[in-house]
Image: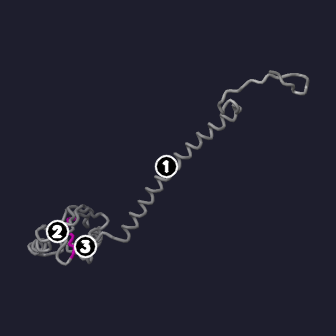
Amino acid sequence: MSFGNGAGGSSEFKRQPNNAQACVPAAMVHHERSNLHNANQWSISRVILTVVGMIGLGIFFLVLYGLLHPNPAAEALRNSKAAVAFHLKDAGSAEYRNLRVYSMNAGRLVVCGEVNSRNSFGAMAGYVRFIGVNAGEAVVETDMVDRTSFDDLWATRGCTGSTGDLVMAE
C-alpha cells in the first residue's frame, strides 16, 4: 500500500509490533533504564539511612535513660574510689581489684575491695582492703592500727557476703 507524501515520492507503511519499546527511540529506553537503576539505588540508600538513623536514635535514648536513671551501685563505687584516693600517697597510680557492692538493710550500699598504689619511694605498696559507704566515706586497712578491728569491720559491713546482697562486682 502506497501513500503520497506530497513530495512526489511514496513511502511504505509497515505495521509496527505491538510493544512500547518499538515506538520509543533507543536513547529514551536507555535513559529510562538508568532512571530505574537510580531509583533502586535511592531506595537502598534510604533504607540504609533509616536503619542507621534508628540505631542512632536508640543509642540516644539509652544514654538519656542512663542520665535520668543513674545506677546507684556505680555511683557508690565511684564515690568510694574517690574517698579511698584521699588515703593514698599517689592516687593516680591506684589499681583496684575484687570490687564488690553490697546492698545492706534500708537500701544502704557498701563497697568492698582492694587497692594498690605507689608509696613514698615510688614502688607499688601492695594490695590492701578498703570499705566504702554510699556517702563517699572509706576506711582503708592501713589506716587502722589494730588489724583485728578491721577484720571485724570487714565482716560486719557485709564484705564477706554473709549479711548483704551482692549488687555489683568488678
Residue 48, position as x, y percentages in the image: 49, 49
Q: Do callouts 2 and 3 mark residues in contact (Cβ within 8 Å)?
A: no
The tag earlier along the polypeptide, 3 or 1, is: 1
Rendered location of residue 28, percent (x, y):
69, 35
- Residue under pointer 2: 165
**Quadrant in which residue 153 is drawn:** bottom left
What label sits on residue 39 in the rendered view?
Answer: none
Name the secondary structure under disc 3: loop
How crowded pointer 2 is (Cα within 10 Å; few <14, some 14-19, many 20+) is rated as some
**Above or below: residue 88 compared with residue 25:** below
Near mark 3 (Cα within 10 A), the count class, few <14, some 14-19 or many ≥20, is some
Total label count? 3
Q: Which residue is located at x 30 percent, y 71 percent? A: 75
Residue under circle 1? Answer: 48
- State which quarter of the image contains the N terminus: top right
Alpha carbon distance from label 3 to label 1? 53 Å
Question: Mark 2 or 3, which is nearer the eye?
Answer: 2
Q: State the extent of the magenta-drawn residues as a range.
A: 107-115
Is 20 displayed left or right of 146 in the figure?
A: right
Q: Quadrant of residue 169?
A: bottom left
Q: Residue at x 20, y 72 (%)?
A: 110
Q: CA distance from mark 1 to mark 2?
A: 45 Å
As drawn, which residue projects farthest toward the front?
1
The reply to whether the magenta stretch includes residue 114 is yes
- Numbered label attached to residue 87: 3
- Mark 3 residue type: His
Q: Residues within 10 Å of mark 1 (few under 14, many from 20)?
A: few
Task: Specify whether 123 is left or right of 41.
Answer: left
